[in-house]
Structures are given as C-alpha cells and as structure tokens.
Image (spheres, rainbow, N blue to C red):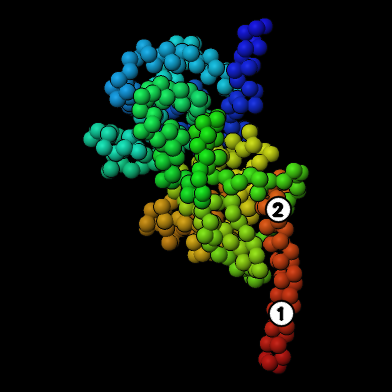
C-alpha cells in the first residue's frame, strides 16, 4: 500500500501520457507514426527504423565523450528516474527495468545531442546522416518524428539527464527548452511575439510546442462553455463583402474581424505541418479539452477552406504560405487543390463546444456580417438581373 501511494505522489494521473484517440487515428494512421526515429516505448520495436537506432547509439557515444561522463554514471541517473518515468504512460510498457533504463538513456541522449548539434553546427561530424546538406528531408523527418504525440519521453527525464551531464557548464549553455525551441522553430511557426515561456514543468516536447504557440490565456479564455456553429467558406464571405488581410501578428491565434476586414496571421506550411496539426489536436482532445486552441484553430480554417477557390484566396492573400510545403513545380499549379484537400481531410466541424471566447466572437461577428450583407447582395444582384432583362426587351 505504501508503494502504491508513493507511485501516486510521484506521478499525478492528470500528467500521464495518453495515446491518440482511435477516432482520430483512423483519419490518417501514418500521421501519428514515426518515419525515421522512434522515441519512447510505443514504437520501440519498430523494425523499419533499424538504421536510425544504430545512429542513436552513435549519438550516445558522442554525448558521453562530449560530457566526459561515464556510462555507468548516466545509467544510475536514469535508474533513479525509471520507475517514475514508467508510470507516466497510461499504456502498460512491455519492457523490464533494464530494458526501460537502456531505452530511456539512449533516446534521451539522442534528443539532447540532436538539439546541441542543431544549435552548434561546428560540433557536427561530416558523416552525420541527420544533418546531411544533401538530404535536408532527413532533419525535417526527425523534427516531425520528435513532435509526435506517441513518440515522447517525459521531459523531467531529459532535463535531469541534461543538468547532470552539463552541471559545470549550465551557465554558458542555453537551457534544454531553449535548445528545443531553436530546433523546432525552423518548421513550426514558432515566431510568437514577446518572451517565450521556458518553464521546465512541461510533460514532454509536444506539450512545450503547444505552450510556445499560445497567446496569453488570461486574454483568450472564458469561464464557461459556448456552442459554436460553422461559418461560410472564404469565397462566400468575400462575396458578402468580407475583405481578407494577413495579420502582422506572429501568433496563429490572433484572428480578428473588424469593420469588414478579417485579419489572420500567416500560417507557413512545411512537409510536417499536417502531421503536427493532427498530433497537436489529438493531444488537446486527450489533455486540453478545456483550452483547445488548436482544435478551434483547425476547425476555423476548415470552415474557411471548402473549395479550391477558398484555398486560392487565402494563398493569394499570403494568409497561408505554401512555398516550403510543395515542390516549386507544384506550388502554383496544384497548391490550391492540395490545400483544400488537406483541410477537408480533417473533416468538417459544423458544431462544437469551446471556452475560447475570442474564436466564438470572431465567428459570431462574421456570421452576422455575412447574413446582413448577403441579404443586400442578393437584392442588388436581382435588381441588376431585372435591369438587364428590361434593356434586352
């Protein structure tokens, strides 16, 4: 009984790692599975990632050489954290204690070394397959894989290992979260205004990524829940007089509608963006239903983008930047079609509940503007049609 109570105190139930809900997994199974590198217990036995498993051991070796720590010292650090780490996962881990310690140390050292090599290019070796200049897709896929919901280690494990390894140099090095921010920033729209939060009290790297995207919660969230309905697509809104503008804000959620202008920050698409959006919304479905920024954001864009014409309008206004998403030959010819297909693949949400008052107000104001202006637009079009008929007579 004492041991059971100790486990409860070590790991709160509300901070345990959830898996992707089956309903969301069925929409696109591949979006939740690693392509190159597995982190943590869920995909530990993946055969197709054998080459990267070998490379992780090379990173462990360079990590030990760089920190001048003995392997047995690092094993002891992880051993002291292993039981707490095991209980962070809701699913039962099919690894004994020694296997778990080995996995956590190899994966943890890999992530730390990955972040360091990204931040300090001079530390890289010429034959590093991840940072190969001729295979830029490698680093993109690794960045994608390390942000998957089911491909995570508890952050306290990474932080403890980092602090132990660089104890005498912590003042001269960025924190682990700062290194992570720099690593993901290249392809994750991490350009938010103001100081970023580098609080080590996060569950894992995906949790940190979500935190770095958020605006000030005090300005955005309300106390109660609101039922919100779908809004018309971008082309219909434009026909009713709504004018689209790219917002100067760097925070994706700073969407405003004022005096007929809809201001939306630029969303830059990269090859891993779809996977990221699916994983971050799955994470919110499991852990953040009370403050579901990304669920609301994807639903909002999903309402706006119904057709190729809708997609083309948002691309033209630079609200969505697809330059780095598709190949240059495809960008102009197929970009609008691919963008419409992307957001249609998330499924159309016609009605849902949220506490995000900001999104609710934007939706309500847009619908009210659309209804009033669409009514007069139809009357105007009818009058024009009647005038043409009279002239022809």
Which residue does the image show at 50% across and 37% down from the upper left? 198
Please say if 22 is above or below 44.
Answer: below
- Counting from the top left corner in percent of width and height, residue 113 is at 36, 29
Which residue does the image show at 40% across and 35% down from the upper left? 174
Q: Earlier in the sequence, mark 2 or mark 1?
A: 2
Q: Secondary structure at mark 2?
A: helix
Which residue does the image show at 67% across and 91% down from the upper left? 392
Quarter-of-image position of residue 165: top left
**Front one among 261 and 146:** 261
Please say if 9 is above or below 277.
Answer: above
**Front one among 384 and 172:** 172
Q: Residue furthest left?
A: 126
Q: Which residue is mark 2?
A: 360
Query: Can residue 32 be spotted in the picture?
Result: no
Q: Residues within 10 Å of mark 2 (few under 14, many from 20)?
A: some
Mark-to-mark CA distance, 2 and 1: 30 Å
Which residue does the image show at 50% across and 27% down from the upper left? 155
Q: Residue furthest top?
A: 1
Q: Which residue is mark 1?
A: 380
């Amino acid at each position: 009984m004492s041991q059971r109570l100790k486990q409860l105190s070590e790991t709160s139930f509300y901070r345990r790692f959830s898996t992707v809900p089956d309903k969301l997994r069925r929409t696109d199974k591949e979006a939740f599975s690693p392509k190159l590198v597995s982190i943590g217990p869920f995909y530990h036995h993946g055969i197709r990632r054998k080459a990267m498993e070998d490379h992780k051991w090379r990173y462990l070796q360079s990590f030990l050489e760089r920190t001048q720590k003995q392997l047995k010292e690092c094993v002891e650090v992880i051993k002291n954290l292993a039981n707490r780490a095991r209980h962070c996962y809701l699913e039962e881990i099919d690894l004994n204690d020694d296997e778990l310690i080995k996995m956590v140390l190899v994966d943890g050292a890999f992530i730390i070394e990955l972040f360091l090599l990204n931040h300090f290019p001079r530390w890289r070796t010429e034959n590093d397959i991840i940072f190969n200049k001729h295979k830029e897709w490698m680093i993109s896929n690794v960045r994608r894989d390390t942000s998957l919901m089911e491909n995570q280690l508890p952050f306290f494990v990474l932080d403890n290992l980092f602090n132990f390894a660089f104890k005498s140099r912590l003042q001269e090095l960025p924190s682990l979260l700062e290194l992570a921010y720099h690593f993901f920033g290249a392809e994750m729209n991490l350009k938010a205004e103001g100081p970023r939060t580098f609080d080590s009290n996060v569950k894992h790297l995906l949790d940190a990524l979500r935190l770095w995207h958020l605006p000030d919660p005090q300005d955005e969230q309300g106390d109660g829940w609101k039922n919100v309905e779908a809004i018309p697509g971008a082309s219909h809104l434009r026909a009713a007089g709504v004018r689209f503008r790219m917002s100067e804000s760097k925070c994706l959620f700073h969407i405003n509608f004022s005096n007929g202008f809809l201001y939306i920050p630029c969303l830059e698409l990269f090859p891993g963006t779809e996977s990221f959006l699916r994983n971050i919304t799955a994470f919110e479905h499991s852990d953040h239903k009370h403050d579901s920024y990304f669920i609301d954001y994807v639903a909002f864009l999903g309402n706006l983008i119904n057709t190729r014409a809708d997609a083309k309008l948002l691309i033209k206004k630079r609200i969505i930047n697809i330059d780095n998403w598709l190949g240059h030959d495809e960008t102009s010819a197929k970009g609008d079609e691919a963008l419409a297909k992307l957001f249609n693949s998330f499924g159309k949400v016609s009605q849902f509940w949220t506490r995000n008052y900001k999104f609710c107000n934007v939706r309500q104001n847009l619908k009210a503007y659309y209804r009033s202006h669409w009514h007069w637009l139809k009357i105007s079009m009818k009058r024009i049609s009647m005038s043409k008929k009279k002239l022809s007579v």
